[in-house]
């Protein structure tokens, strides 16, 4: 059972939303003091406030189970957003709370202007009946321009269209997000972006495990169709995957903040021109000693169903990013793959997939093996001692 506390009271209509949802216990309090809030908050997964309760860093720290803080209103001045972000807690507000009333007020002014109601009202109060000079106009067929296309603008446009007006939508900026400290996704954007978000997390995790040494900066490059999208959630996902191997509680909310605190520099670049792949995400990590490690990934198929890691450093591979992987740089020579297979077989570890690539015949080759069991350190050590094997790295996704 998820527990939520409304510390500044809550309307009965709003409470019904929680009870109808099921699985959520809403405790409505009003006039909670700072001391009472500190004592209570540890029990709750969610906190709803208006303007009275001050959500300080101390209160956030005491909320050991907190996952979300909701502000019933637009302003979040009474919420320590950086402290919440550091803890990975989503902070949300309710910018749409007055959307309908504001839009309807706009429409009321529109009708009033079209029908010259203020002038007629003043004329009547002056004892006149000047209807000939107060003739209004019909809105049907008229053109209206909407500057800005946020929540209010979209509702005004929708009603005006229903009245038969021609709407000219200006400065359309896409979906409006309610989260104030994380790039949020509406349903349509989520459908398009979530495959790339999931792939980004896998890519970051792969990079963290494959790189040997401390990563100092990461350059994330987007190529092809994905470069035309808002990639902020994908970059955050790469950071989540990268940092989660050394830090606890990393998520979309705090990934960039924690990266900055760790001294990790993150940059993005985009090019809409597609190379070998329709979409490509590449993460280049520079290590403390100056070495560069690079991993690239893409998604194939209808509805973005088939993610693949397609490049490890300069080597082209075809790797399903899941389960247990062995990355084995080795000499391009006969018998080495056979020896590796024998070691895994003797350890009762099944190879489910395998991919290899070489740049020059007889030179270095990189093999990536998908295996059904987590290979123990002893197996990795045995493989690394095979003549011609340069390294044996385990990656778990």
Image (cartoon, rainbow, N blue to C red):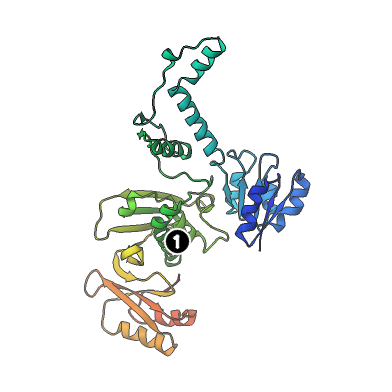
| Residue at 54% over, 41% down | 95
Locate the C terminus by quadrant: bottom left
Against 147, residue 215 (above or below) is below
Q: Quadrant of residue 80?
A: top right
Locate the N terminus by quadrant: bottom right
Between 241 and 229, the one nearer to me in the picture: 229
From the viewer's perspective, is 166 left or right of 273?
right
- Name the spot of residue 282 as percent of width and height, x first: 35, 58
From the viewer's perspective, is 313 left or right of 232?
left
Between 60 and 185, the one nearer to me in the picture: 185
Between 309 and 121, the one nearer to me in the picture: 121
- Please name the residue that numbered disc 1 is placed on: 201
Please tell me whether mark 1 sits on a helix, a strand or a loop: helix
Name, please, the residue furthest toward the left. 361
**Residue 126 showing in the rendered view:** yes
- Name the spot of residue 196 as percent of width and height, x first: 39, 59
């Amino acid at each position: 059972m998820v527990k939520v506390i409304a510390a500044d009271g809550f309307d009965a209509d709003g409470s019904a939303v929680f009870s109808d949802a099921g699985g959520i216990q809403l405790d409505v309090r009003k006039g909670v003091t700072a001391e009472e809030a500190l004592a209570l908050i540890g029990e709750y997964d969610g906190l709803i406030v208006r303007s009275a309760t001050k959500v300080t860093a101390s209160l956030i720290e005491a909320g050991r189970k907190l996952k979300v803080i909701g502000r019933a209103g637009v302003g979040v001045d009474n919420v320590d957003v950086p402290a919440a972000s550091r803890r990975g807690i989503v902070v949300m507000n309710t910018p749409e709370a007055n959307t309908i009333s504001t839009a309807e007020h706009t429409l009321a002014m529109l009708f009033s202007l079209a029908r010259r109601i203020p002038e007629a009202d003043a004329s009547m109060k002056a004892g006149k009946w000047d209807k000939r000079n107060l003739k209004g106009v019909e809105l049907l067929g008229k053109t209206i321009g909407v500057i800005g296309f946020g929540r209010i603008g979209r509702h005004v446009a929708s009603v005006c269209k229903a009245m038969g007006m021609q709407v000219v939508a200006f400065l359309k900026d896409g979906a409006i997000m309610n989260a104030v400290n994380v790039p949020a996704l509406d349903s349509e954007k989520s459908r398009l972006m979530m495959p790339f978000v999931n792939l980004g997390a896998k890519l970051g995790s792969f990079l963290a495990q494959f790189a040997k040494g401390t990563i100092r900066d990461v350059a994330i490059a987007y190529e092809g169709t994905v470069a035309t999208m808002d990639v902020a959630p994908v970059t955050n996902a790469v950071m989540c995957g990268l940092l989660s191997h050394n830090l606890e509680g990393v998520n979309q909310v705090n990934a960039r903040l924690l990266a900055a605190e760790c001294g990790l520099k993150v940059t993005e670049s985009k090019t809409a021109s597609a190379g070998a792949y329709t979409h490509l995400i590449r993460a280049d990590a520079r290590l403390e000693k100056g070495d560069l490690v690079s991993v690239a990934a893409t998604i194939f198929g209808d509805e973005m169903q088939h993610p693949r890691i397609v490049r490890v450093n300069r080597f082209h591979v075809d790797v399903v990013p899941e389960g247990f992987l062995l990355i084995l740089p080795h000499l391009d020579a006969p018998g080495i793959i056979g020896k590796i297979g024998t070691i895994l077989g003797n350890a009762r570890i099944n190879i489910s997939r395998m991919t290899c690539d070489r740049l020059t015949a007889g030179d270095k080759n990189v093999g990536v093996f998908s295996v059904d069991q987590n290979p123990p350190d002893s197996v990795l050590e045995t493989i690394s001692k095979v003549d011609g094997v340069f390294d044996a790295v385990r990656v778990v996704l």
